[in-house]
Image: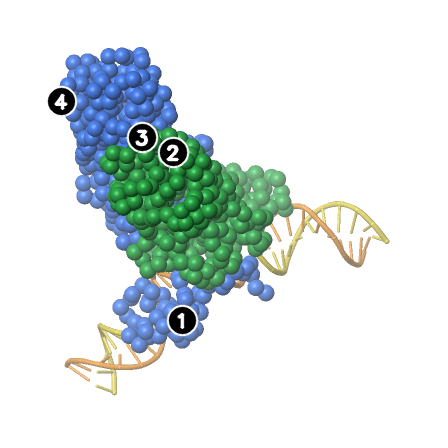
Chain colours: A green, B blue, C yellow, D orange
Amino acid sequence: MKRRPSGIERPTIVDVADVADVSRQTVSRVLADHPRVAPATRLRVKEAIEKLGYRPNRMARALVTRTSLTFGFAAIDMQDLHFGDTCSGMQAAAREHGYYLVVTELDIDDERGMGTLETLLTLGVDGVALFPSFLQDSDIEQFAATSGCPVVVIGRECQIPNVVSIAMDETAAADLVVGHLVDRGRKRIGILMNEMFPEVVHGRYVALHRAIAHHTTVASAPVEAERPKISHGRRAATTLLQNHPDLDAVVGFNDTMAMGALLACDDLGLRVPQDVAVVGYDGITFGAIANPPLTTIVQDSIGMADAAFRALLSRVKDGSPPEGESRLWQPELLIRGSS
Amino acid sequence: MKRRPSGIERPTIVDVADVADVSRQTVSRVLADHPRVAPATRLRVKEAIEKLGYRPNRMARALVTRTSLTFGFAAIDMQDLHFGDTCSGMQAAAREHGYYLVVTELDIDDERGMGTLETLLTLGVDGVALFPSFLQDSDIEQFAATSGCPVVVIGRECQIPNVVSIAMDETAAADLVVGHLVDRGRKRIGILMNEMFPEVVHGRYVALHRAIAHHTTVASAPVEAERPKISHGRRAATTLLQNHPDLDAVVGFNDTMAMGALLACDDLGLRVPQDVAVVGYDGITFGAIANPPLTTIVQDSIGMADAAFRALLSRVKDGSPPEGESRLWQPELLIRGSS
DNA sequence: TGGCATTATGTGAACGTTCACTCTAGGGTA
DNA sequence: TACCCTAGAGTGAACGTTCACATAATGCCA
């Protein structure tokens, strides 16, 4: 009696072996480009593979090798504009090295998102990239310790044993932003913060505060926190500007919030950049069509994605972290019309 | 001698069985919520699972059941703004049903993208969703036939045996757009087309042409085709408007191109909407902050993603397509300042 | 008591692959 | 001839799970 539930039967290595009249081990050797196969045999096997349309079963292979040539990529939010760049970049790097990327969205509702990560493990990934994970450092640390596979955190600096973090230099970015604003004569800067995922947000928050204290005569900056969406940014900026009429600059946690701030300025009859300068983070394309075009901090998403992949790969290969694993990525300031 | 290459040993079902002092089959039954397990035994097993932190190995399970509870989601472009919505929606639906989604980006460079799809199969997915696939119908047909798993195409209507397509009603959308423009007194409409992926684009192209021929006195509309990016849209719109000074409306293939058209109008000193009306497709958030805010066609991405998942699921479960599989999704017109 | 369901649990094989090892034929060297 | 080496190919076991079947214990009824 057949067990196979339905559908087409995909050929197995044994089918190939039968057709080529060799053992399955020989087929396996051809697949792995093992040198000790006679040229004639190799040819016969390759023909059989072609003829049957055989594709090796990665699951069976992973079961015995304990290596799936697959990395997991766990993101908070696939609608995030960075996600696409980073994920594409990692996919490209992975493909180049014969790896496969399994992408998943962490479930925020799930208690601390750990459940989804565990499921990723049951899939047999060899390593995991967390795209700016909202998980707490302690959770990541525990996961890294018990998962038995390398872990990389992208987009957020963190000091966790055995975890590589690929992140932008927030201090440098804040210096660029605040320095630029001060150069343009701004004296009083307000901040639009992301109220979600404190673990992710904190570094930028602190860096901006420090830079403002350092570059301006005012020791602290007023802050309004909301979700990182246009409408929320608009609301937060309205509140901020109404409560602090002396502000002559607003820095958004990201471009989306900053674009909300542009709308808020319009609502309040404030001219940008004459009355208020607005700066964002991320360098999203749509910043260019904002009115006025948005000044923003850009980072090398693709390069960071590539580094993340290489970090995982080198960990898997020889267990050691790659060179310069914790170097911070330098941001650039893209000056446009809003400042 | 140990084989395990490195890292933590994850407990297996046998470890659990040892601790709970039962057979592995009993553990398996507890995992599957099989009724024929004594309550006391069930409790003991669950405690052992908890104590060891055991997670079943999906690959081993998939090997024997020939079912991985995993669907593949293949996208052209993860930076596409629809991608996030659709993918999130499918993930949510999948998670709800105990399924897992493996997301991958099709490699355009790869000869017709088939290689990536094949790799997806070696991962053992139970079904595949193609997010608006640039693959040719014949390739999809062949893939559906040889893969032995259900295939769904999202975002593009196609008539392929055994393939469910989840798509918006392009005819209705074109009628909405053109009808609206004609209502506002527009007489001469130009089209900004996507030059990439003819298979994906064709339906919208034809529908718009038909609607224009039907609603206006002009039998045909001038078309300019470029890549669906802001800068390309700007260039295409400039060309279009310069070559056809009589145009009083421009329809963009998507919001991104339409936003390029807004810039082009600004470049050419044309007022929107007084001189030229501009309409896009997709309803992306940033359309709201364009200047003026962009009129656009919106579709229910989440609902479509959900339907795509259910289509795959019902195929896997009983081999039959779900009810009303090929119904088209109705678009809505979101009227804003640009028309 | 015998007979027969019914419930709870265990056993061997299988899924498709690779690993560690064995076997064979042929050639070179002393 | 006797010996060892090497290239080429094969064999059984293992990876971690579930399936189909077998077994043991229990309850019920005649």
- Residue at the image point whose x is 29% and y is 42% from the top: A245
Q: How much space separates mark 1 and mark 3, taking CA atoms? A: 58 Å
Q: Disc 2, disc 3: CB below 8 Å?
A: no
Residue type of the residue flagged with mark 1: Lys
Residue B51 - label = 1
Give the SS element for disc 3: loop
Q: State the mark number for residue A339.
A: 2
State the CA–CA distance, disc 4 to disc 2: 40 Å
Residue closest to the eye, A214 or A315:
A214
Residue at image location 45% in from the left, 44% down from the top: A215
Closer to viewer: mark 2 or mark 3: 2
Q: Which of marks 1 and 3 is in front?
A: 3
| Residues marked 4 and 2 touching at CB (< 8 Å) | no
Q: Is A270 rendered above or below residue B219?
A: below
The one nearer the camera, A49 or B165, is B165
> Disc 3 marks which residue?
A291
What's the distance in space between the residues labelled 1 and 2, CA to CA? 58 Å
Dot 1 and dot 4 residues touching (CB under 8 Å)? no
Tell me the quadrant of the picture where the C terminus of chain B can be found: top left
Residue B140 image label? none
Residue A15 locus on image (x, y percent): 47, 46
Mark 2: amino acid = Ser
Q: Mark 4 belongs to which amino acid?
A: Asp
Q: Mark 3 lies on which chain?
A: A
Q: How crowded is mark 3: few (under 14 residues within 10 Å), some or many (20 or more)?
A: some
The chain containing the residue under callout 2 comes to: A
What kind of element bears circle 4? helix
- Is B42 in front, or is A155? A155
**CA separation in Å, label 2 and label 3:** 12 Å
**Is there one chain holding both mark 1 and mark 3?**
no
- To which chain does the residue with label 4 belong? B
* First-in-chain label (1 vs 4): 1
